[in-house]
Amino acid sequence: MSKYPGEDVWTGPLERPGGEECDVSEQADMMALRITQKQPAAEDIEFFELRHPDGADLPEFTAGAHLALRVPNGEIRKYSLCNDPEERDRYCIAVKREVGGRGGSVSLIDESRVGDEIMVEAPRNDFSLAPSPQYLFIAGGIGITPILSMIRHIRSRGEGRFKLYYLSRTPAMTAFLDELKQPEFRGMVTIHHDEGNPDNALDLWPVLEKPGAQHLYCCGPRGLMQAVRDMTGHWSTAKVHFEDFTPPGAMTKPEDKPFTVRLAKSGAAYEVPVGKTILEVLRDNGHVVPSSCESGTCGSCRTKLVAGEVDHRDLVLSDYEKPENIMVCVSRALGDEITIDV
């Protein structure tokens, strides 16, 4: 399972399928790409096309991949690619303008212009498309971006069949709506608008009740993904994949309180304050912990739990794994202290 799209979130502190916002360490191997298109894709969503200034081919990417780029305010943010991986001459992203985020999407949308050059890392993929004769896609809002890349890949290769359920609030807030309503998608795409009313939400149980041969890919708000996770408990975990773009701060709960994380190998102990993750505290104190999405969906930061009770906030661990593991990018202690195998 994984995470990333186009909002101030990806997956942790990240901005994915259309604008996920995510803090990542400074990278030296970045390339300068030029913004060659910038136009509205929907209400509060902006489409960007990036090309090499000299017209050269770009590094290859696979369906579901994302870019890390430096936005005008200097921050590094991640956004899911939405174009066909067969295209080597451009990268396309759709970015949701998140006023309440960390500022990455606002900076990119408000401060960049066609012709500007921005620094970009080569694409990475934490939400890759598994070989399958059939796919089931569930996208919420800007979560359509990595899934759209997958659909374009499937159609250009002629490999596999798919069914897409695309959920959004209103038609005006639905990116790529005109494209997905074209006749060639008839019978393959269901678009549902709830008008912001939970009572109008699409009932996905008939879709998920009977597992089949297909792989399921879900990307969107955490509430949607949690609902899908709850309805697919009887599916093989190897066939259910998630990508998150929860806005920064959305994982914080009113009842959160500081706690101590103790490291079993060294005996060191650090306070984890409200609003900061175990992963961030470990980094601040010089510890290197594997991580990627930082939103509790990819499993990279899985850490052995030695002692203490955990408030699990990930979408990776099964119930039988939770007593002995913790995702340090999102989960917190229920008590005053936990001990982890670091």
Image: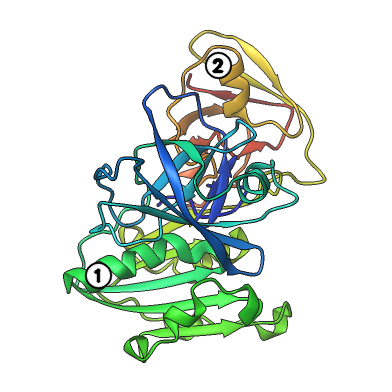
Whether residue 320 appears in this view of the structure is: no
For image coordinates 59% across by 53% down, the residue present is 7
The crowding category of the residue bearing disc 2, from other C-alpha atoms within 10 Å (few below 14, some 14 to 19, many at least 20), is some
Side of 151 relative to 71 (left or right): left
Residue shown at 49% from the left, 49% from the top: 79
**Secondary structure of the residue carrying numbered label 1:** helix
Q: Position of residue 114 (x, y in %)?
A: 52, 50
Above-or-below relation of 154 to 295 = below
In the shown orientation, is residue 257 left or right of residue 46? right
The image shows residue 178, relative to residue 247, as above or below, that is below
Locate residue 66 relative to residue 205 in the image: left or right.
left
Label 1: how many Cα within 10 Å (few below 14, some 14–19, many 20+)? some
- Image coordinates for residue 320, horizontal then vertical, percent: 45, 49
Residue behind mark 1: 154
Quick one: SS at disc 2? strand
Marks 2 and 1: which is nearer the front?
1
Q: Which mark is residue 36?
A: none
Mark toward the start of the polypeptide (2 vs 1): 1
Q: Residue at x 41, y 48 (%)?
A: 66
Q: Which amino acid is tagged 1?
A: Ile
**Looking at the picture, which amino acid does disc 2 mark?**
Leu
* Quadrant of the rendered image containing residue 82: bottom left
- Report whether residue 223 is seen: yes
Above or below for 331 versus 202: above
Give the residue at mark 2.
263
Q: Is residue 105 above or below residue 157?
A: above
Depth check: give the residue in front, 133 or 320: 133
Q: Nearer the viewer, residue 340 or 90?
A: 90
Picture residue at 36% right of the left edge, 61% below the top: 83
